[in-house]
Amino acid sequence: MRFCRVLEMAAPKIAHAAYQGPNVLKDIFYGISMGLAAGFLWKIHHWNVQRKTKEFYEMLDRGEISVVVEDE
């Protein structure tokens, strides 16, 4: 009962925004922005994997590492 009275007192103070429908340009802008951000993060990940692979093969060519298990 007490909770309802609090809502009744606060109700006239709440401003309700009028729904104007979807804003197509804003949605397109948000979609393009999110797509570019996701693509950029994926590209950074791809560059890191590519760098690690290149370093592995360079170390393999220099003889610093080997993929063959040595017998003891």
Image: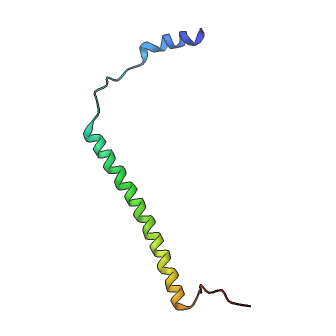
Placement of 23 over or under 60, stated as above or below:
above
Please say which color scheme the image uses: rainbow
User: With 11 as the anchor, is 21 left or right in this view?
Assistant: left
Which of the image's four quarters has the N terminus? top right
At horizontal 28% and vertical 29% (from top left) the residue drawn is 21
Q: Position of residue 13 (x, y in %)?
A: 42, 16
Q: Position of residue 50 (x, y in %)?
A: 45, 73
Which of the image's four quarters has the C terminus? bottom right
At horizontal 49% and vertical 11% (from top left) the residue drawn is 9
User: With 6 as the anchor, is 27 left or right in this view?
Assistant: left
Question: Which of these two is toward me, 38 or 10?
Answer: 38
At horizontal 42% and vertical 65% (from top left) the residue drawn is 44
User: With 38 as the anchor, is 62 left or right in this view?
Assistant: right
Quadrant in which residue 4 is drawn? top right
At horizontal 29% and vertical 33% (from top left) the residue drawn is 22
Placement of 4 over or under 60, stated as above or below:
above
- The residue positioned farthest toward the right in the image shown: 72
Number of numbered discs visible in the structure rendering: 0
Placement of 68 over or under 34, stated as above or below:
below
User: With 7 as the anchor, is 68 left or right in this view?
Assistant: right
Placement of 71 over or under 21, stated as above or below:
below
Quadrant in which residue 16 is drawn? top left
- The residue positioned farthest toward the left in the image shown: 25
Q: Position of residue 62 (x, y in %)?
A: 53, 91
